[in-house]
Image: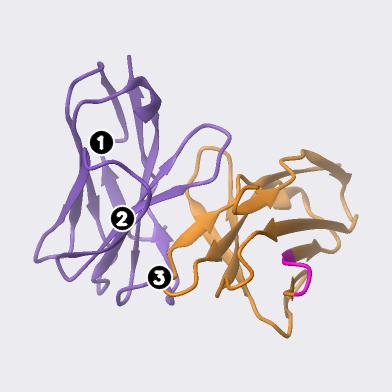
Chain colours: A orange, B purple
Amino acid sequence: RKEVEQDPGPFNVPEGATVAFNCTYSNSASQSFFWYRQDCRKEPKLLMSVYSSGNEDGRFTAQLNRASQYISLLIRDSKLSDSATYLCVVTSPGSYIPTFGRGTSLIVHP
Amino acid sequence: ETGVTQSPTHLIKTRGQQVTLRCSSQSGHNTVSWYQQALGQGPQFIFQYYREEENGRGNFPPRFSGLQFPNYSSELNVNALELDDSALYLCASSLAGGFGNEQFFGPGTRLTVL
């Protein structure tokens, strides 16, 4: 089993839709969790950290489920500009070395 | 723009050659991490430099080596290039060692090994 797994998609949704991605991780002792966004042929950029209590930033909500070992990202009212690849990141216990998932591709169409 | 720059933007090498990639960190950042991103995959952590010392290494062979300079810029060196080394190489700078602070990525160097 890979350390961090994501459905590569693509998720093809219309503008205004709500879409959710999950990311599963194998090490139950993983410490920190993040979502990054990567536009085509660009560098990754931090979208949000994921806290145990869940967190929200505008249209984006991230949640952590330690019991089932996954994190999720919910995007409400999708915009064309949300089209990108969303990478989840999980850090190892102790070293905090980050492991990236392969990313989930989102395409928002008019 | 993150303020992190990388050079060159593109590079073509042949198997067995050596390559040096460069990264200038964002002003005020003393930590640089290097990643390899193959096509269709997420970035894979190579190593991190904090105050000119290696501060963590991923699962990469010794032919991947690095340096950090007193101005906190960094180099990634890869010896004896293999076809599988073809990838986008990203550096990310952050404040303080470890991964507790946000990492700011540069635009990457796309390496092709023929």
How far apart are the alpha carbons under marks 2 and 1? 20 Å
Q: Chain of mark 2?
A: B
Q: Would you place residue B48 above or below residue B78 in this image?
A: below
- Residue at 64%, 59% (x, y): give it: A26
Residue B101 image position (x, y, % from top left): 42, 76
- Residue at 60%, 64% (x, y): give it: A27
Is circle 2 on the same chain as circle 1?
A: yes
Q: Would you place residue B26 above or below residue A19 in this image?
A: below
Which residue is labeled 2 in the image?
B47
Residue A49 image position (x, y, % from top left): 60, 73
What residue type is disc 3 on? Ser
The kind of secondary structure the magenta stretch mainly shows is loop
Q: Chain of mark 1?
A: B
Mark 2 surroundings within 10 Å by alpha-carbon count, few (fewer than 14), some (14 through 19), many (20 or more): many
Queried whether the magenta region covers residue A9, the answer comes back as: no
How far apart are the alpha carbons under marks 3 and 1? 30 Å
How far apart are the alpha carbons under marks 2 and 3? 12 Å
Judged by depth in the image, the label closer to the viewer, 2 or 1, is: 2
Q: Nearer the viewer, residue A31 or A77?
A: A31
Secondary structure beneath label 2 = strand
Q: Magenta residues?
A: A67-71
Q: Which mark is residue B8?
A: 1
Which residue is labeled 3 in the image?
A95
What residue type is disc 2 on? Phe
Q: Which mark is residue A105?
A: none
Residue B92 image position (x, y, % from top left): 36, 58
